[in-house]
Image (cartoon, helix red, strand yellow):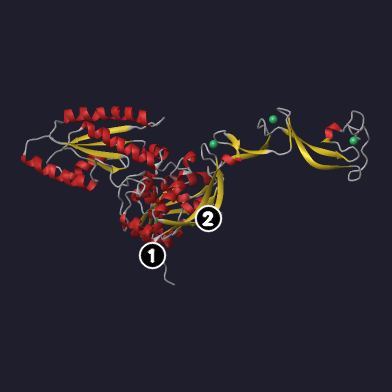
Amino acid sequence: MKRSTTNIGEIGTTIEVGDYNFLFIRNMSATAVEELQHHAAVVIEAVNQDYVRMVATSIRANPSPDIYLKPIFLLKKDASETPLIDVLADDSVKNLSELESLLPLVGRIASRSQELTFINSISFEAQLITKIISLLYVRELKVIEPVPYTYSNICYYYPLLSVNFDHVDEYMALEILNIGEEDGIFRSEFVDRVYLCSTCSSGHLSYREVCPKCSSSDTTPDDVIHHFPCGYVGPMKDFSNQIDDKLDCPKCNKRLRHIGVDYDKPSIIHECNNCNHSFQDFYVNAKCLSCGDDRSVETLKATDIRRYHLTKKGELSAVKGLITTTKDIDEVIGTIKFDTFKTMLKYEIERLKQTEGSSNICAIHITNSSHVYSRLGSELQRGLLKDLVTVIRGNIRTADVIAFQSSSTIVLSMSDLPAKIGKRILNAIPELLHDLIKTRFDDLDVHFECRLVQLDYTKSDEVHLQELLEGYF
Ligand SMILES: [Zn+2]
Ligand SMILES: [Zn+2]
Ligand SMILES: [Zn+2]
């Protein structure tokens, strides 16, 4: 048999396998996952489960496709199953020499990744739908399976999607999948139903039988006794005496003989040790272990957990890129498309070659957009975007244009204006935006960062945009 000629050499954190470089992350090492953009795949030494979960999660939650799409392999000596990590990872090997067998898979994922188009989506929902459909597409997977998971805030986890959310916001994954289904990107089927806190959407609830009067769960049950000869009905404690364990009827004073002959126990009564109320039927309350809310089970949100399948339209959306969901606005009034903005920038640079003028492009970036959008429903999100545009529009001249580069970055032009004055106008905008947000949204903290780049006709439009948008997603 012909022996393989592939070399597997380890240099620092890089392992060379055939023509590919793999990033090797050793157990508990402090390797930055950003390194992965320079590698074809990552191999994580799976010793400590928490560590593996942390690394795999931060890769899949990364906003850059150069990182989140990359194959994750586990190096594990035993065959232990870890349902969540196994979904986040692509495969596992027992020792590094087996990596060679994974090369065809690495090649397939790399070439399918090339087929995808990444457009900056205008909404948080569209961004996350893009992520999940891209992950499915490059792996030739079609199903998003909910995994029962004790650490999940809603008891079920969609690993490739849920990793993008903080623990308290995990229920948002369900909203994203719903929106995707409404747009025909997924179809779904019922798997299970969970009950979530109506205040914070957590599924970690403690169910208790409580007193209908004061909601205390500190109650004591007692048998109800029916004395046949006199017809008296009352709790057992009314029949007991101080001297012996025999029972005497409080109404007719006769001693009770045999159950079924002269008396029976038709039911149970509960006495509340908090308010002394006696009752037969409990209320059932659910106490939320996350926010402490304690309310009747009828107030809980019954929520379906479904299995989702990628449709043909979903596959196409991955290949073509997805900018908005139908829930988003196709175009926010007062803005132009980002592509049009780029074209106009190109012309403006050309124009500056002929004239002595000074023109600028600016960006207003929401630095905590994931936080902001995950707190607003799509309705409010649309409202926020409209408001931002209205305020900006009110502060620039009619000849200048506004466009969304992504749901977190607004770009605008300030033509024929000295950079100094442009900066002054730009820097005043966040203050106005904050005032407006305060009146429209309760308790919403939005952080803005502004940048201005003065146009230089010796540089291309691409270079200008790179400078303006560096580090923004
Ligand atoms: Zn009570
Ligand atoms: Zn009696
Ligand atoms: Zn709660």
Mark 2, residues whose alpha carbon is within 10 Å: few (<14), some, or many (≥20)?
A: few
Mark 1 is on which residue type? Thr
Q: Quick check: 470 above or below 2?
A: above
Residue 323's label in the rendered image is none
Q: Residue furthest bottom?
A: 1
Q: Residue furthest front?
A: 230
When asked about the image quadrant of residue 234, the answer is top right
Q: Residue at x 30, y 47 (%)?
A: 330
Query: Along the horizontal axis of the image, is 208 left or right of 373?
Result: right
Image quadrant, ligand 2:
top right
> On the rendered image, what quadrant is the C terminus found in?
top left
Which residue lies under the disc numbered 2?
190
Camera-side residue of 227 and 357: 227
Camera-side residue of 36 and 265: 265
Mark 2 is on which residue type? Phe
Q: Quick check: 243 above or below 50?
A: above
Which residue lies under the disc numbered 1?
5
Q: Position of residue 156 (x, y in %)?
A: 53, 48
Q: Residue at x 36, y 40 (%)?
A: 381
- Label 2 sits on a secondary structure element that is strand
